[in-house]
Image: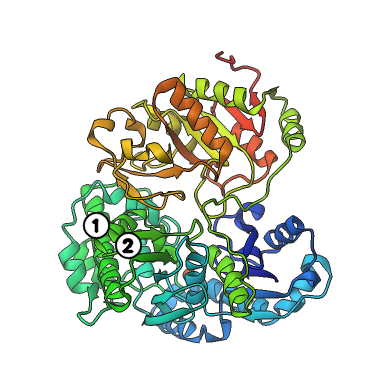
């Protein structure tokens, strides 16, 4: 049973599932090179179909993680809030409404659009599914668990913002829902905007900033803005923070009167801003814990699946695992709305009784891959110096360059599904050097100096370095770095003594693992600094994009499959 899941809203994506087995999945942003793009994901769909060698007409169904006709509550709230602020409506609202209308039109006439734009063959029936159920399926149905409690938390679904559920292989039972406008995703987005960053995009920056501050504003935020309810759930004061479709000021004059002026994007970050980030993070974590404990009481399950955009908050995930009453946690690599497309395909497969073989998702390698010949053509076109190595010598050579303090762009295999580079489209560096953070910011990223870089570690040796209670294959959990190791890998230790860890097991990414092993043999440290392969753009997808990004930086090496390339002017360092 072949089912294509797709989403045309923010974080547009497509995923192909065959009888429950994942065949391919990718975000549209990687193809059209616009972060978080909302569009009919034609490129991602074509990629999925090409991977399986099929056409649109060969599918059994198309599944969409939105019951678009139920988006009325969202629209009503948005229009209501914008009417209170006509200027804002004139500037931003009209554009948002235009996009929303386009999204609805695409969904309402989806079969026609797909048939016309994908490959001209007949589109099978399209099934629209509950958004939060699709999020739930995107975690539960690829988790290693037979049964689990499920928590979905995002900005908003058709009309809800949070769902507590429990499920096994063949059903998901919804236990509680929280209605709009009470939304944790929107609360954090509004604080992100207040702090001068882009809402719905830069929340991870606020999470990183939180470690520098103290939660002085947390009591006031709890009292005035976001309160947990004794019977479960929570309440957001939308007189102070209001989101909906507005994309600019998401907080009211009263919020500013209570908490002080907002930060302009170009303004210096002050201790007050750090404290607000810490306070919002604390309030978010407390509210999530409140929900998790309620879910534990309702289900008595020992395992928890998390999904929805808020599940990208890896600091909160750690707190949930530590204090929420569950023994194990699973968060899929695409926990946000792109993942809902995969969830839709899985959920529809399950509902039709077609879930005969199931993928336990331990890898995020579901995107496009390219041959060595494609890589060589892109490298030679740019007139780079190219040398070819077999896998073993390649890993040895790269490990040596890393240990000597050089930076390496590492392009291998299928592009990652979800927002994290996990060793297929990565920038790698030696975590042992204190100055590596500054060096990367100087040579590549030019980003806020307080943002931490993450470590990859051989799974079986993770315990030597990090206080981690289980695997963390998708960098969706932070863990304290053991105090004896903080000086060993200073470049990946955040100011609060934690790291956003990726554990690399024996099977999921053999080549990346081999590189980690080579580095460990050479240095005694089985850890690499791993950040994404991009420069102010979506993560690179194709060899050409990789070369273009490489050339915009001062990084010494570009490794693509078995080819190791450098500029003519740089010494090989060997
Ligand atoms: Fe969502």
Residue at 61% across, 22% down: 393
Front-most of residues 141 and 356: 356
Q: Is mark 2 within 8 Å of ligand 1?
A: no
Residue at 27% across, 51% down: 210
Name the residue tied to disc 1.
276
Q: Quadrant of the N terminus?
A: bottom right
Label 2: few (<14), some or many (≥20) within 10 Å? many
Q: Which mark is residue 200?
A: none
Left or right: 320 in relation to 387: left
Name the residue tied to disc 2.
191
Left or right: 369 in relation to 233: right
Does dot 2 land on a helix, a strand or a loop?
helix
Label 1: few (<14), some or many (≥20) within 10 Å? many
Counting residues from the N terminus, which is met first, the one under dot 1 or under dot 2? Answer: 2
Please state the horizontal and vertical placement of residue 215, each as a whole percent of the image.
Answer: 19, 56
Q: Are marks 1 and 2 in contact (CB under 8 Å)?
A: yes
Residue lying at the far right of the rendered structure: 120
Which quadrant of the structure image shows residue 63?
Answer: bottom right
Q: How many marks?
A: 2
Which quadrant of the structure image shows residue 450?
Answer: top left
């Amino acid at each position: 049973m072949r089912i294509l899941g797709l989403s045309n809203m923010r974080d547009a994506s497509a995923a192909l599932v065959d009888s429950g087995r994942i065949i391919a999945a990718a975000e549209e942003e990687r193809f059209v090179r616009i972060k978080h793009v909302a569009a009919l994901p034609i490129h991602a769909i074509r990629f999925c179909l090409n991977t399986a060698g099929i056409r649109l007409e060969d599918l059994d169904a198309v599944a969409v993680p939105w019951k678009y006709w139920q988006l009325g509550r969202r629209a009503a709230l948005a229009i209501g809030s914008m009417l209170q602020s006509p200027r804002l409506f004139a500037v931003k609202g009209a554009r948002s409404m235009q996009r929303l209308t386009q999204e609805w039109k695409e969904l309402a006439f989806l079969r026609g659009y797909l048939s016309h734009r994908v490959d001209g063959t007949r589109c099978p029936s399209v099934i629209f599914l509950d958004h939060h159920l699709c999020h739930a399926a995107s975690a539960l149905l690829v988790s290693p668990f037979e049964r689990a409690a499920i928590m979905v938390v995002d900005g908003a679904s058709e009309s809800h913002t949070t769902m507590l559920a429990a499920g096994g292989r063949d059903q998901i039972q919804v236990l509680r829902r929280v209605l709009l406008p009470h939304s944790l995703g929107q609360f954090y987005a509004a604080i992100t905007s207040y702090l001068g960053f882009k809402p719905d995009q830069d929340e991870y920056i606020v999470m990183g900033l939180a470690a520098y501050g103290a939660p002085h504003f947390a009591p006031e935020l709890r009292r005035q803005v976001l309160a947990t309810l004794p019977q479960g759930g929570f309440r957001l004061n939308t007189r102070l923070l209001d989101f909906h479709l507005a994309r600019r000021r998401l907080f009211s004059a009263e919020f500013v009167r209570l908490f002080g002026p907002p930060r302009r994007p170009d303004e210096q970050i002050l201790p007050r801003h750090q404290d607000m980030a810490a306070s919002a993070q604390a309030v978010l974590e407390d509210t999530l814990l409140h929900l998790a404990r309620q879910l534990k009481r309702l289900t008595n399950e020992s395992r928890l699946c998390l999904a929805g955009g808020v599940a990208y908050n890896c600091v909160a995930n750690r707190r949930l695992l530590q204090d929420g009453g569950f023994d194990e946690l699973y968060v899929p690599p695409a926990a946000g709305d792109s993942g809902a497309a995969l969830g839709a395909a899985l959920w529809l497969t399950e509902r039709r009784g077609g879930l005969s073989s199931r993928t336990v998702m331990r890898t995020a390698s579901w995107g496009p891959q390219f041959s060595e010949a494609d890589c060589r053509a892109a490298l030679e076109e740019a007139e780079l110096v190219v040398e070819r190595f077999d896998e073993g010598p390649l890993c040895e050579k790269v490990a040596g360059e890393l240990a000597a303090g050089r930076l390496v762009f590492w392009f291998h295999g299928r592009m990652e599904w979800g927002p994290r580079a996990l060793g297929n489209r990565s920038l790698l560096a030696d975590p042992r050097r204190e100055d590596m953070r500054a060096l990367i910011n100087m040579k590549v990223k030019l980003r806020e100096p307080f943002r931490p870089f993450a470590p990859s570690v051989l799974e079986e040796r993770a315990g030597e370095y990090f206080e981690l209670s289980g695997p963390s294959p998708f960098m969706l959990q932070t863990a304290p770095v053991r105090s004896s190791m903080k000086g060993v890998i200073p470049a990946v230790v955040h100011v609060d003594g934690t790291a956003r860890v990726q554990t690399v097991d024996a099977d999921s990414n053999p080549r990346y693992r081999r590189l980690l092993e080579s580095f460990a043999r050479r240095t005694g440290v089985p850890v690499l600094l791993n950040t994404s392969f991009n420069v102010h753009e979506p993560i690179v997808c194709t060899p050409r994009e990789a070369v273009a990004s490489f050339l915009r930086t001062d990084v010494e090496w570009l490794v693509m499959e078995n080819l190791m390339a450098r500029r003519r002017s740089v010494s090989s360092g060997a």
